[in-house]
Image: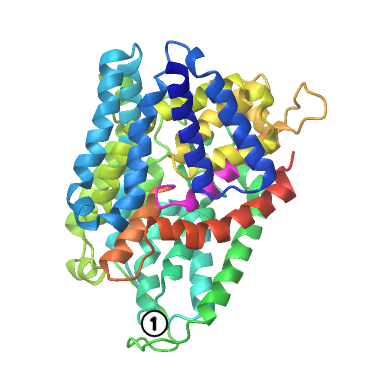
């Protein structure tokens, strides 16, 4: 009875992950079923250091409520989501703190990751809120697509969060009177996710890979072609949809004109935030670590980011903040929901990591691509990336703790198994999947939620969680991701 209960929980979780994304191609469906079967049959054989399978239920409940709350019980969810998110997180944190031998260490590490995460996105959110970009040109398919392409490019320089926060307001402003839900969706697809796939600054998973030893300029030569294919396909679809909207209501913006930027000093703050990203002992060997010196859950990098955010807000031009309709509600919702997500996903990540480690030899490039992608859509893509990077490295006899070995892994070591793909292809599959698949849901990447909230607060029509899935991400992104798999990762 105990085994059947645990097997059911594992089955439920993996089916939730797989079928939430409409994974219906025969190859991936058979692989997903194989994973479920293996996990279920070995459910009672988990090592003692791993959490019980039922502890994943708070995570599943939180995801379910994020998906259904705004749609089915909107008022209750808006009023109580902080309590729900924190409460479910406390359940998992309490179990780890009181009953798991390594629990306090895991909780401390998770808190460090959360503070780094919230420091980066909150500083970029506040700094970009003090920059007003006025484009004196009404939105047209050509203007909008050029703006999205520009956002995709600069997301590799200032991160997907920075690019999203910088451009979402002028993007909505020039399309006032003709704004449709797909405008926000494609902004999330292109600027908030896929655009940032070319550098470690672009998206957190790639930055973690850089910290582990993947060369900074490894990504561009190995991902640029997939990046171009994905962006071209999405921009073509977007132009077709946007051309059907028409001109809409005139909003006082000239048909043609230039660009005016107010709040230029905030670009200096933006540069400070980006530079602070590199202030890590893993990057600069001699750089002091507050975590090790004083056992704090944050470091100099986080202090600088929070300090920049505070200074930027206090010195911001009030007229710019008013014109941007700036307030802290979007970052507040992200902060509360993601503290619950970070806490409740701990057991899921540990169990997934254990499975990836113990079955690395059986995982092909295809499986690494699809599983990393599917989980990155509902889990935080940074730790998911690390788990599967560790599994792929282990498959090639490489230690994740050795930067030199990881550099060799990225350079293309051959597997001892004759006929297997190179390690470079495995790394490319994991990197692309972690970044691209983050666009599948609002919780796949932090900027997604922030863009959604900013748009909703300005009375722009925004798809709810389920509508985003079945109307946009599944029918548009999955065929594209399948094509990329077919062309590059079908091994």
Span of residues in magenta: 428-444
Q: How is the image coloured?
A: rainbow
Q: Write down the quadrant of residue 389 in the picture.
A: top right
Q: Write down the quadrant of residue 402 in the picture.
A: top right
Q: Residue at x 38, y 48 (%)?
A: 446
Q: Residue at x 75, y 33 (%)?
A: 421
In the rendered view, does 186 fall on the left or right side of 61? Answer: right
* Mark 1 crowd level (few <14, some 14–19, many ≥20, 10 Å Cα): some
Q: Circle 1 is placed at which residue position? A: 136
Q: Is residue 72 above or below residue 295?
A: below
In the rendered view, does 285 fall on the left or right side of 322? Answer: right
Residue 368 in percent (x, y) is at 62, 35
Q: Residue at x 27, y 34 (%)?
A: 88
Q: Nearer the viewer, residue 98 or 139?
A: 98
Residue 299 in percent (x, y) is at 31, 31
The residue positioned farthest toward the front in the image shown = 1
Give the quadrant of the C terminus: top right
Q: Is residue 411 visible from the viewing direction of this image?
A: yes
Q: Nearer the viewer, residue 459 or 131?
A: 459
Residue 274 in percent (x, y) is at 40, 47
Give the quadrant of the N terminus: top left
Q: Residue at x 62, y 28 (%)?
A: 392
Q: Is residue 293 visible from the viewing direction of this image?
A: no
Residue 17 in percent (x, y) is at 49, 40
């Amino acid at each position: 009875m105990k085994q059947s209960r645990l097997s059911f929980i594992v089955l439920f979780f993996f089916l939730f992950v797989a079928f939430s994304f409409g994974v219906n191609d025969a190859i991936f469906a058979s692989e997903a079923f194989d994973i479920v079967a293996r996990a279920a049959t070995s459910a009672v054989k988990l090592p003692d250091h791993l959490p019980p399978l039922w502890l994943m239920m708070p995570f599943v409940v939180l995801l379910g409520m994020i998906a259904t709350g705004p749609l089915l019980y909107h008022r209750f969810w808006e009023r109580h989501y902080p309590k729900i998110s924190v409460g479910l997180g406390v359940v998992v944190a309490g179990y780890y703190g009181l009953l798991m031998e390594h629990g306090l260490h895991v909780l401390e590490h998770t808190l460090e990751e959360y503070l780094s995460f919230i420091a980066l996105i909150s500083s970029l959110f506040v700094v970009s809120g003090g920059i007003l970009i006025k484009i004196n040109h009404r939105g047209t398919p050509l203007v909008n697509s050029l703006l999205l392409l520009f956002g995709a490019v600069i997301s590799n320089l200032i991160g997907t969060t920075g690019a999203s926060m910088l451009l979402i307001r002028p993007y909505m402003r020039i399309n006032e009177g003709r704004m449709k839900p797909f405008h926000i969706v494609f902004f999330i697809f292109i600027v908030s996710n896929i655009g940032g796939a070319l550098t470690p600054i672009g998206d957190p998973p790639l930055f973690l890979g850089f910290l582990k030893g993947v060369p900074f300029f490894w990504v561009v030569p190995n991902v640029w072609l997939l990046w171009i294919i994905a962006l071209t396909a999405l921009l073509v679809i977007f132009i077709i949809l946007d051309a059907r909207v028409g001109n809409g209501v005139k909003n006082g913006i000239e048909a043609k004109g230039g660009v005016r930027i107010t709040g230029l000093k905030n670009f200096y703050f933006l540069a400070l935030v980006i530079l602070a990203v590199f202030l890590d002992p893993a990057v600069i060997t001699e750089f002091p670590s507050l975590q090790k010196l004083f056992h704090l859950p944050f470091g100099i990098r986080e202090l600088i980011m929070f300090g920049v955010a505070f200074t930027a807000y206090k010195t911001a031009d009030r007229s710019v903040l008013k014109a941007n309709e700036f307030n802290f509600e979007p970052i507040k919702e992200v902060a509360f929901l993601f503290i619950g997500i970070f806490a409740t996903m701990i057991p899921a990540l540990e169990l997934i990591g254990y499975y990836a480690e113990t079955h690395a030899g059986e995982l092909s490039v295809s499986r690494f691509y699809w599983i990393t992608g599917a989980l990155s859509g509902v889990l935080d893509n940074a730790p998911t990336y690390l788990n599967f990077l560790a599994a792929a490295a282990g498959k090639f006899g490489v230690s994740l703790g050795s930067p030199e070995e990881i550099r060799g892994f990225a350079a293309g070591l051959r597997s001892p198994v004759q006929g297997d793909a190179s390690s470079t292809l495995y790394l490319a599959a994991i990197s692309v999947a972690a970044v691209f698949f983050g666009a599948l849901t609002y919780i796949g990447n932090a900027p997604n939620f922030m863009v959604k909230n900013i748009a909703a607060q300005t009375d722009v029509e925004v798809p709810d969680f389920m509508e985003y899935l079945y109307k946009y991400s599944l029918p548009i992104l999955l065929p594209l991701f399948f094509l990329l798999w077919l062309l590059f990762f079908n091994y």
